[in-house]
Image (cartoon, grey):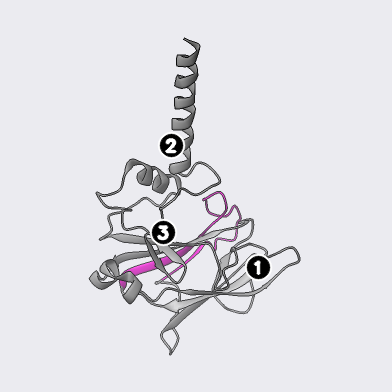
Amino acid sequence: MIRWIVTLLLGAVTGLTSALWLSGWTPLDPPGLFQAIEVDDWRSDAAIGSDAADPYTRAYVARRGLLGLRREEATYYLRNVDDDGAQLSENCAYVIEGEAPAARWWSVTLYASDYFLAQNTDDAHSADASRLPVDEDGLWRATIQAENPGDGSFWISSRYAGEFDLLFRLYNASEDVLNTPEDILVAPNIVRLGCQEGGA
C-alpha cells in the first residue's frame, strides 16, 4: 500500500512539474519552443498559430501573452540577446535597426522579465510600421534604453524591464517569408551602445 501511494505521489509531482515547465511557468524555458526557426538570433516556431501546436505549445503561447493568431495572420520572432550574444538588459542602451519586412504590418515590442510590458509610465513599449520613419537606405531604427535619449530618435523604454525579450511580429507576411524565413527575412540588428555599472 505504501509503495502504491509513493508511486502515485511521484507520478503526480512529475506530471505537474513537467506540465508547468513545458507551459512556461518555471524560470527555465521548455525545450524546442521558439527554436524551430532562427534568423540572426530571432527565433520562431512554425507550430504557433497552427493546427500542429500541441497543448504545451498553446499553454506556453498563452502564458507569454502572444495571442497566437494563425500563421497566415501573424508570425512571431523572439530575441533576448544583442548582436554580441549578451542578454538584453535594462542596464544597457541599444540601437535596433532593420529593413521593413515583406508584411502588411509589423511591430517590435519589449517584454520585461516577467513576460509583461515593463511596469513604467513612459508609454514607449514598442515600435511599429506606422510610427517609424524609413531612411533613404530603406532602414528604420530605434533606441532601446531606460531613459529617453532626448536626441529625437525613436525610443523604446526598458525602464524596470530587468532582463528583457523583444518580440518581432509580422502581420500578413508574404508567402516567401512564411515558407523560407531563413532565406528571405532580413531581421533587425541589435547593437549594444554601452551599459551602466553592473550591466552586461
Q: Which residues are magenta?
A: 103-128
Which of the 4 image quarters holds residue 195?
bottom right
Cα gap from disc 3 to disc 2, whole angstroms: 19 Å
Q: Nearer the viewer, residue 131 or 26?
A: 26
- The numbered mark at residue 92 is 1
Q: Residue furthest bottom?
A: 136
When asked about the image quadrant of residue 100, the answer is bottom left
Where is 192 relative to 53, above or below?
below
Taking the spot 43% from the left edge, 37% from the top edge, the residue there is 19
Q: In the rendered image, which quarter is residue 18 located in?
A: top left
**Pointer 2 local density, CA inside 10 Å: few below 14, some 14–19, many at least 20:** some
- Expressed as whole percent of the image width and height from the top left, the position of residue 6 reads 50, 18
Q: Nearer the viewer, mark 1 or mark 3?
A: 3
Residue type marked 1: Cys
Secondary structure beneath dot 3 equals loop
- Magenta stretch contains residue 89: no
Left or right of 51, for residue 199? right
Q: Nearer the viewer, residue 81 or 101?
A: 81
- Report which residue position mark 3 lands on: 35
Q: CA distance from mark 1 to mark 2?
A: 34 Å
The residue at the point 28 percent across, 58 percent down is 71
As helix, strand or loop, the secondary structure at mark 1 comes to strand
